[in-house]
Image (cartoon, helix red, strand yellow):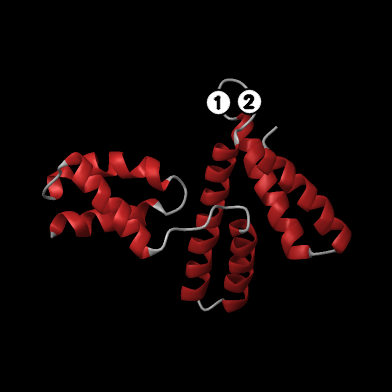
Amino acid sequence: MSALKDKLKADLTASLKGRDEVRLRTIRMALAAVNVEEVAGKEARQLSDDEVVKVLTKEAKKRREAAEAFRGAGRAEQADAELAEMAVLEEYLPAQLSDEELRALVDEAVAETGAAGPQAMGQVMKAVNPKVAGRAEGGRVAAAVRARLAQ
């Protein structure tokens, strides 16, 4: 079992004992998503820490998008609840890259590949994605690469 999944289970017990409702429901949801991912496919398997991080990143993104939708619909209370859940999930995720760090990684990837022009976007994305690995959202990385190649 991955160390991150063990930590989630331990934190679930602690939040149950501490009667922290937001944390409890968020960790339960995260563990359920991890379990669903483990049994998806042809046979059940144990997820690595990297795979658990990917699942948690996906869940955090869902919460962010739901909060935006609730805000747009004028439902601030539900939006705040989603943001609270997202904050709990982010405690288990690696620190996000700043814009400057992301720009530096993109510049490095462009230099490595010798890419020029928007048609080289796929080539640069292929080089930069392993370096970013869960520390920045895909849309944010793509926007940075697009901006750099447009220069």
The image shows residue 12 at horizontal and vertical percentages of 78, 51
Q: Are marks 2 and 1 in contact (CB under 8 Å)?
A: yes
Q: Is residue 76 above or below residue 115?
A: below
Name the front one of labels 2 and 1: 2
Q: Which mark is residue 41?
A: 1
Looking at the rendered structure, the secondary structure element under dot 2 is loop
**Residue at 42% across, 54% down:** 136
Residue type pointed to by label 1: Gly
Quadrant in which residue 86 is drawn: bottom right
**Residue at 11% across, 47% down:** 116
The image shows residue 89 at horizontal and vertical percentages of 62, 57
Quarter the N terminus occupies:
top right
Residue type pointed to by label 2: Arg
Looking at the rendered structure, the secondary structure element under dot 1 is loop
**Residue at 38% across, 44% down:** 131
Q: Is residue 84 above or below residue 114?
A: below
Is 53 placed left or right of 25 in the picture?
Answer: left
Q: Which mark is residue 45?
A: 2
The image shows residue 22 at horizontal and vertical percentages of 73, 64
